[in-house]
Image (cartoon, coloured by chain):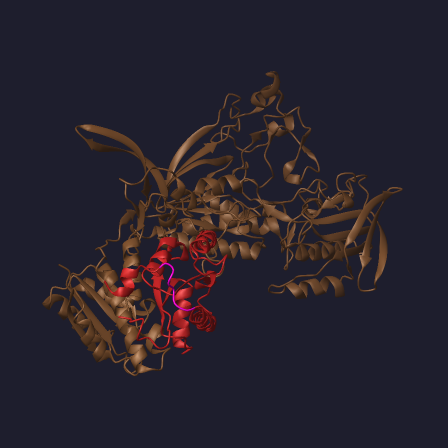
Amino acid sequence: MQRIGVFICWCGSNIAATVDVEKVAEVIKSEPGVVYSVNYQYMCSENGQQLIKNAIKEHNLTGIVVGACSPRMHEATFRKAAESVGLNPYMVEIANIREHCSWIHKDMAEATEKAIILVRTAIAKVKLNAPLTAGESPVVKRALVIGGGIAGIQAALDIADAGFEVDIVEKNATIGGRMAQLDKTFPTLDCSACILTPKMVDCAQHEKIDILSYSEIEDVKGFVGNFSVKIRRKARYVDETKCTGCKICMEKCPSKKGLNDFNMNLNTRPAIHIPFAQAIPNVAVIDPAQCIKLKTGKCGICQKFCGVGAIDYEQKDTFIERQYGAIVVATGFKPISLDAFNEYGYTENKDVITSLELERLMNAAGPSNGVLVRPSDGQHPKVITFIQCVGSRDTSGCGKPYCSKICCMYTAKHAMLIREKYPDTEVHVFYIDVRTPGKNYDEFFRRAVEQYGVDYIKGMVGKVYNENGKLMVQGSNLIDNEQVTIESDLVVLAAAIEPEPSVRKVATLLTASIDTNNFLTESHAKLRPVESPTAGVYLAGVCQGPKDIPETVSQASACAAKVIGLLVKDKLKTNPCVATPDEMMCNGCSQCANVCAYGAITYVDKEFRLGGGKTEVRRVASVNPAVCQGCGACTVTCPSGAMDLKGFSSKQIMSEVEAICKM
Amino acid sequence: MQNVTEKKEFTPNIVAFCCNWCSYAGADLAGSSRLSYPANVKIIRVPCSCRVNPSFILKAYQQGADGVILCGCHPGDCHYVTGNYYTRRRMSLLFSFLNYMGIEKERTRVEWVSAAEGARFSAVMNDFVQKITELGENKRLTDLRVKEGE
């Protein structure tokens, strides 16, 4: 038999002024199941809580209803009070008679009547409450960072500095990512390599960090605190433990005609190579598509010259499986393909380049040793035209609808650097808008215009075509309302950025949600910007949305803070109000798993006794309480009504409906 | 217990389902801003609008509710990422079903109310109560035993 206690709060005059609290407590006394009903000035006060605790003990209450303010305010308070005297905290229900009653009604009789109904509704619910216990799951004190760019590096360093083991999985042969390809960084114009490479070295030397370069994640199982990740270590045909990075193999390799992807294919590299001088790990890798030995079986020169015997043509992909408590996704970006933008003549003209290609051309370690030359003839360009928003803010369908955010700033940077180094160069920039929010950003842009005399033209470019070896850039000048054609030596396109395509696979493996532009979705756009809706998965850098280096680093550190907050816990307390399937009714149709945004539902084969000694094996849904967030989407989707939500069961809600309707 | 013959003025009984994260908080804000709406709206708290099974709404009508309103976070703002998208689809199906049953379309409503929209919550409720009052009593789906008080 249920023994319900009801506690009506006055909240000073907040409730008592419009609700006749004594009448409510009196009327409720006659409700079936109610053995105790009282009103008091401030239930949330020390004395009020003591009153509740005493009543629970004295009257052996099995459930309580507190008619007071919103449960968003004091539900936790009253649950704690109940728990302290041995009543399960989930046997407490709140009737919101302040925000939803006394504060919005003026007529006392009306408000009192409503308060009685609200309390009755809460009684109807609490009668069907079941004691719930928050589950616990252990936490593996190790983090995985997917992607070794500046976001991944920063996150890994911060997590490792807090004393936790971190693995960085990077698909390329070296960490460093896009930032390693950059020349200078805005708005301070300090050299990218000078600020990045020390951090890369820190990663390599940190005793808590393990860099798994040239590796990709293959499979992810488990959930927050307990991920099990299978990692493919791609064959690099060089023994990582032996290679000293002496580069003799690079000198001797006869196959030197491979496109250098680190230099945006602007020059060539040998089949066996180290991507760039400061690569971490500083270990060679063989491109199997280019290596003569691997293609034909004849050559083996690098093996002959390698002093430490690191070359191993027989190497195969290997797999390792490791356990992690948290995962940071920092997969980064790439510039979009410009194949769909024929009007700019990118594919036809060697001297139409992207900004990232210009970045390599201006880099002292780049293909032209930092001397700005035209890719076609090696001459110094005298007139350079930049075109912004190539594929950004593009609703035509060819490009991306979003703003890539970094292009305005890096174009101003490029224009400024060129004017600084080569004052005889004429620089034009076509733009739609100049967007420079950020600390010292607008000042930076204004310097480009005012001090460096960069010619900014508001308008879009219609066409770039080759006329007698000159690139003619035809566009509109909206300020002067005229068409202009600029004879240029070099055209630089600020190509939109998009998430690295591999993010799709990563997101699928992690059941992390992704938007229409392939950016990973955050748990809450404003308040949980670095967490994926999938518990235990965190997002850093451009994989979540376009951003520059300072923002990426901030987000990575924020991720690290979240990860550390998770990993310091020995056990995770889980929300007990989770979905729960009735295995007898479940037919394993998978519809619940399809609507689950968190991947909390899996299927297991279970043996059921049919009677008469017979058994049957059926596939039934199984909810992981550590992952389920308790939204209830699955409960409604379930065609057989097998799924229910603890704390908000169908029966409970139905009885609340009944109580409200029974006036 | 209502007695049909003695009743002078019709005051509808309205069940409101509010998601915990947006609309319930919006209702709290309406309260703390003292923005009144009629007392015949009673709120049931659910974790997400997608927790509301269409059968809960049918149950309310069967039990004699005159109107049912379901409030959730604005599309794109769902605390559970995609919950309210499911709500939207399910409810559009329920609307066709209710139409088939001969229940006036206006009796059931879906509204997106954020935690900051206390004023909107109050305005929506005032408007809804007025519409239901104009529509009159729900007779179509009510279980007669309920009205007779059995």
The image shows residue A323, relative to residue A654, as above or below, that is above
Q: Where is residue A257 in the image (x, y as percent from the top left)?
A: 69, 28
* In magenta segment, residue B139: yes
Q: Is the magenta stretch mostly helix, strand or loop?
A: loop
- Most extreme residue toward the right is A468
Front residue of A351/A3: it is A3
Q: Nearer the viewer, residue A250 or B53?
A: B53
Left or right: A659 as drawn, with respect to A534: left
Residue A199: horizontal and vertical position, in percent? 51, 49
**Residue stretch rendered in magenta on the structure:** B136-141
- The image quadrant that residue A594 belongs to is top left
Q: In which quarter of the image is the C terminus of chain B?
A: bottom left
The residue depicted at 20 percent of the width and 74 percent of the height is A27
Quadrant (top left/top right/bottom left/bottom right) for the N terminus of chain B: bottom left
* In the image: residue A595, left or right of residue A573: right
Q: Residue furthest left?
A: A58
Vertical order, B32 against A340 (above or below): below
Residue in the picture at 68% in, 37% down:
A265
Q: So how many labels did they put on this image?
A: 0
User: Does residue A297 appear left or right of residue A585 in this picture?
Assistant: right
Q: Chain A is drawn in which colour?
A: brown
Q: Can residue A216 be seen in this view?
A: yes
Q: Is residue B131 above or below residue A627?
A: below
Asked if residue A597 lies in the magenta stretch, the reply is no
Does A216 appear above or below B10? above
Q: Colour of chain B?
A: red
Q: Where is residue B46 in the image (x, y as percent from the top left)?
A: 35, 59
Q: Quadrant of residue A209?
A: top left
Front-lying residue, A109 or A374: A109
A630 horizontally vs A126: left or right: right
Q: Is residue A579 visible?
A: no
